[in-house]
Image (spheres, rainbow, N blue to C red):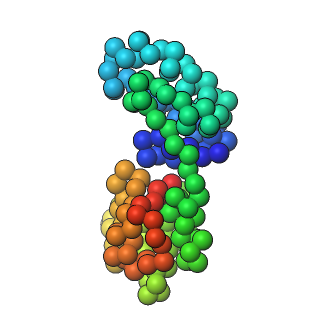
Amino acid sequence: MKIRFENEVYDLEFRGLRRALHEEVDNYVYELDTELFDEYQDDLEEIHELISNKNIDGLVDGYFFDGEVNFFTVESDELLFDALTQAGYEVEKSNVSRSIYVINDEGEEVRISDHKRPAVEQNGIYEEHEYENEIIVKENIIKLAQLKAKGINKLNKSEYLLG
């Protein structure tokens, strides 16, 4: 039961992710125009009710804020981790951040993340992590060309969602 809003993926089965989506929708709508916030209060209430009820079809099929607020279903082959796994790559997902580690076609590890890995302190000295093969993703979207440039050639969609 995953849904996409503003290039972020939310699994509506998880209460915490539903809450995050509620907050993100409020923030997005408020930033559109504060006058719209009041004018379309019914739309906002309907969105929140659909999120709370885990009603993906209602969100995807809905027409909210004159088309300014949109939701999309997420297929497993749109998610990078799932697509890499289905293509036969050896893939690991970080348990603490939005990072994926994959062995490319040349047998080299590639780190794909939405951030640089923070420096680690050893004996009072901070050491930066340097990866020979790393892709830092912007706005949760990774392009096929970025993957191919790092030796990941078995995928064929033009873009993927990091997660």
Task: Residue 26: name its quadrant.
Answer: top left
Residue at the spot 34% in from the left edge and 17% down from the top edge: 34
Q: Position of residue 98 (x, y in %)?
A: 48, 56
Q: Is residue 48 above or below residue 24?
A: above
Nearer-the-camera pick, 27 or 39:
39
Q: Position of residue 110 (x, y in %)?
A: 43, 74
| Observer able to see residue 43 | yes
Q: Is residue 33 above or below residue 120?
A: above
Q: In the rendered view, does 96 fall on the left or right side of 129?
A: right
Q: How many marks?
A: 0
Residue at the spot 51% in from the left edge and 54% down from the top edge: 163
Q: In the rendered view, does 133 fall on the left or right side of 84?
A: left
Q: In the rendered view, does 146 fall on the left or right side of 60?
A: left
Residue at the spot 62% in from the left edge and 37% down from the top edge: 57
- Residue that extends furthest to the bottom in the rendered view of this protein: 106
Residue at the spot 65% in from the left edge and 45% down from the top edge: 1
Q: Is residue 5 above or below residue 121?
A: above
Task: Residue 68: name its quadrant.
Answer: top left
Q: Position of residue 49 (x, y in %)?
A: 61, 24
| Observer able to see residue 20 | no
Nearer-the-camera pick, 120 or 40:
40
Q: Position of residue 91 (x, y in %)?
A: 55, 72
